[in-house]
Amino acid sequence: MSMPFYVPQEQVMKDRADFARKGISRGRSVVAVQYSDGVLFVSENPSQALHKVSEIYDRIAFAAVGRYNEFENLRIAGVRLADMRGYAYDRRDVTGRSLANAYAQTLGTIFSSGGEKPYEVEIFVAEIGDAPEDDQIYRLTYDGQVADVQGFAVMGGASDTVAAYLEEHYTEGASLNDALHVAVAALGHSDSSDRVIPVRELEVAVLDRSRTQKRKFLRLRSDRLVDLLGDRGPETPGEASEEADTADAAGADPTNGSAADGVSERPVAPPA
């Protein structure tokens, strides 16, 4: 009887982490920025149908990078969990922290399980309060780790380069117009050259506490972006764009132009 190969558990976890990180890095970055009236989400996403940023509940938004079918399953599960909790108890009992904890449990279980591959996703869960100091942004990684971030956060793609630009140019309490300009410039920034990202290739949404409606999520369409950003003209080709196009061709992130994976027909059960 032959003996099975032995692989140390540390090596197994390292290989699974490398696999997940590689898949996440192929997509385009998503930026979350706190501004005076809430939280701004900006992503480079040519698709008008496959969104990276979505509403979860009244004051809660969800953003993700990675494989679309995987983070779409998580988004649907979060919506169902929020709806059930708000219906069974009270709408005020639905919080960003509880959703972040539920996502962390789900991602951590999948990552540590040997029966399936880890999810190639990273997630933002954001909630706005009545005042800027009450706003919360949670960043969740593929292995279920949770970080409470303040000011701004970046995930996916060339996140280190984008984060370095935001670190230098971010201003606390900025207006929506100023925060949007900084976020878009950060997404187009690279070590070699800066790109001008056309409005039609931007996905922008906000959690705006100044809205009179109970639901604070608002997606900014192209006409509003033109008013805020102006006529940006054609895209300037650059190295970062070429790398993203190569990743899209490989089917790494369908929200970046390839719908190879599509939407999963079997959503996961709501996180416990």
Image (cartoon, grey):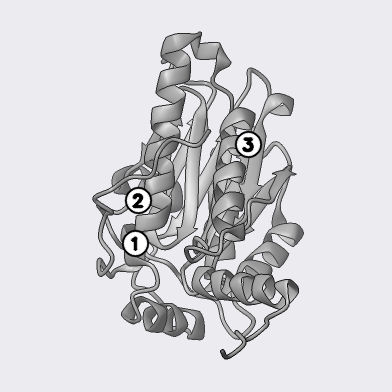
Q: Hey, what amino acid is under mark 1?
A: Thr
Q: CA distance from mark 3 to mark 1?
A: 26 Å
Structural crowding at the residue carrying mark 2, measured as other residues with C-alpha within 10 Å and reported as few (<14), some (14–19) or many (≥20): some
Residue 228 is situated, as x and y percent measured from the top left of the image, at 44, 46
Structural crowding at the residue carrying mark 3, measured as other residues with C-alpha within 10 Å and reported as few (<14), some (14–19) or many (≥20): some
Q: CA distance from mark 2 to mark 1?
A: 7 Å
Residue hosting label 2: 51
Location of residue 258 with respect to 171 vertically, above or below? below
Location of residue 271 with respect to 12 vertically, above or below? above
Which residue appears at 50% of the width and 9% of the height? 89
Specify whether 93 is left or right of 236.
Answer: right
Which residue appears at 37% of the width and 58% of the height? 68
Q: Hey, what amino acid is under mark 3?
A: Asn
Q: Secondary structure at mark 2?
A: loop
Counting labels gives 3
Residue hosting label 1: 255
Which residue appears at 32% of the width and 81% of the height? 249
Whether residues under marks 2 and 1 lie with C-beta atoms below 8 angstroms apart, the answer is: yes
Which residue appears at 65% of the width and 52% of the height? 153
Instruction: Report which quarter residue 173 is drawn in.
Output: top right
Is tag 2's residue or tag 1's residue first in the polypeptide sequence?
A: 2
Residue hosting label 3: 101
Depth check, front residue: 188 or 71: 71
Residue 182 is situated, as x and y percent measured from the top left of the image, at 60, 55
Instruction: Report which quarter residue 172 is drawn in.
Output: top right
Q: CA distance from mark 3 to mark 2?
A: 23 Å
